Image: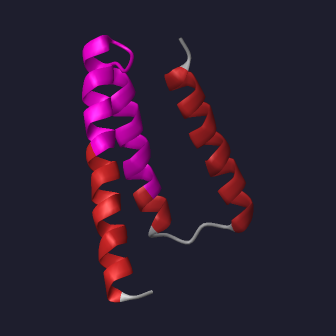
Amino acid sequence: MTKGAYYRQVSQSRDKLSGLYYSFIVLGILGVVLPDDIDVISQLSERMSVIKDSDVFPEKEQEIISVIERVVKQTTAM
């Protein structure tokens, strides 16, 4: 990857992250995403960081992915 391509990718990633934050704010204003939903996502992210830094057996990875999918589905259910 060239230096220019790298910096372009970094810039695009920052723009996408900024858009994500704005989306959360707008969805919160509209009542689509509730404060509890954001708390659950934040807690899940913190736990994933702990798991990432530890040794996880490959068979546990699928279980972890299933939990994430279930939480996301529950959060987005209307």
47 part of magenta stretch: yes
Residue at the right extreme of this rendering: 59
Residue at coordinates 56% horizontally, 72% vertically from top-left? 55
Toward which corner of the image does residue 56 lie, by quadrant? bottom right
Toward which corner of the image does residue 28 lie, by quadrant? top left
74 part of magenta stretch: no
Above or below 64: residue 53: below
Above or below 24: residue 44: below
Q: Is residue 75 left or right of residue 33?
A: right
Residue at coordinates 34% horizontally, 50% vertically from top-left? 16
Residue at the bottom extreme of this rendering: 2
Image spot of residue 3 (x, y percent) = 33, 87
Quadrant in which the N terminus is drawn: bottom left
Residue at coordinates 32% horizontally, 82% vertically from top-left? 4
Image spot of residue 12 (x, y percent) = 34, 60
Image spot of residue 66 (x, y percent) = 67, 42
Residue at coordinates 33% horizontally, 22% vertically from top-left? 27
* Front residue of this view, candidates 54 and 35: 35
Q: Is residue 2 left or right of residue 70?
A: left
* Front residue of this view, candidates 6 and 42: 6
Q: Main secondary structure of the magenta part?
A: helix
In the image, the segment drawn in magenta is 19-48
Image spot of residue 6 (x, y percent) = 36, 79
Number of marks in the rendered image:
0
Toward which corner of the image does residue 24 lie, by quadrant? top left
